[in-house]
Image (cartoon, grey):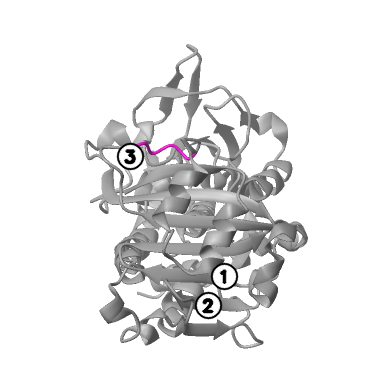
Amino acid sequence: MIKKKPLNIAVIGGGIGGLTATLALQQAGLHAELYEQAPQFSEVGAGIGLGPNAVRILQRLGLGKQLDAIRAPVTGFVFRHWNDGKLINDQQQNAENEYIGGWPVHRAELITILYEAIPHERLHTGKHCQSLTQDTEHVYITFEDGTQVTADAVVGADGIHSVVRNTYHTDQPIFSNQIAYRGLVPMKRLTFLGDEAHKFTMWMGPQRHFLIYPVSRGTVMNVVAFVPPEGNWRVESWAAHGEVKDLAKEFDTWDPHVQKIIQAMDNTMRWALYDRDPLDFWTQGRVTLLGDAAHAMLPHQGQGAGQSIEDALILAYSLREADTETVSAWLQFYEALRKPRTTRVQETTRSAGKLYDLPDSEIYRRGESFSFSNRSTWLWNYDADQAFKQAMHTIAHP
């Protein structure tokens, strides 16, 4: 039996999704090369909560020990009223709810463990994709530095402003009419929080909500505050500088704990929140999309990274089945398996953001709406490995 030559896959974009895809493709026996526009692999100082749907995949990719070393232990998720901190809903973590709130990690630390798991000769920086074309056999990528690359398939993991996506689509990002402030606070400054320092805690109020959770093994508190836009400010960059005094003014009538947390911040970043409507298609011939390039979503369910990680595993499993003649068909298979789920996550995430910013008259009446019981069934309990196996079984036994 002649052993088929491994496919040569070019991954455009070196964020969490692109790195996870490169690692998963490599472990599936494919030759993957990643091209990142930045001069080095790095991330801004920010936390993310990885749900069990993402944690399972990273463990399956051999990163369980590394992930355990960077995560912060949490004991639950608490929802509180905006002005007095009164408890609205308390989701305790226990043996049955191991992942309440997810596994919080520092985004830069997650990028590092993914980066270290991939042979560095397959990772290329300073490569800003300018354009791509394809024929029936290959895809041809041109970078801004004038270099060109030929691949059997291309994965666009280059974010909400994806060049790969814009090759085949003309839609634009949609402003959510909300901006977010982010910051990190050394945990030693927040002793007044007591045991609540080990939880995800969200204060909810009219048009605003304020979220904290620990990262970096519990040594740092991640702070995220969602507020209405100010004037015509619409800057999307995570690196846009914000003023702590402006953030304090947004919450100057809130629970004193919220005000004390803000006072403990040295600096903050702010960015305007955008997403995109679900696409009609991700795949065109030998080119497909992944992560924010395919399904940019708001952060209100903490699933942006998680969905890109799910994409990565399903993509790798799909292309493992392909050869040079069937690449397009298997990319279509990947899309068909992923798109209904990511569309649902996009849509429910928009709804979650509205739920967290309810007026006073609704907050207590809707308290049970903040339970994770419904979410855990379809969102967190999803197993990408099993989903792929079931889809393959359906093909074999229609």
Using the rendered image of the protein, determine whether residue 244 is visible from the camera's viewpoint: yes
Q: Secondary structure at mark 1?
A: strand
Q: Residue at x 40, y 70 (%)?
A: 204
**On the rendered structure, is 333 left or right of 191?**
left
Residue placed most toward the observer, 103 or 80: 80
The residue labelled by disc 3 is 285
Q: Residue at x 63, y 80 (%)?
A: 98
The residue labelled by disc 2 is 78
Residue 388 percent location from the top left of the image: 48, 66
Residue 175 percent location from the top left of the image: 27, 46
Please say whether residue 235 is one of the residues in the magenta stretch.
yes
Kind of residue at disc 3 = Gly
- Determine whether label 1 and label 2 are within 8 Å by CB: yes
Residue 200 numbered tag: 1
Q: Label 1 neighbourhood size at 10 Å, few (<14), some (14-19), many (20+)?
A: many
**On the rendered structure, is 85 left or right of 343?**
right
Q: Which residues are magenta?
A: 234-238
Residue placed most toward the observer, 325 or 104: 104
Q: Residue at x 71, y 56 (%)?
A: 216
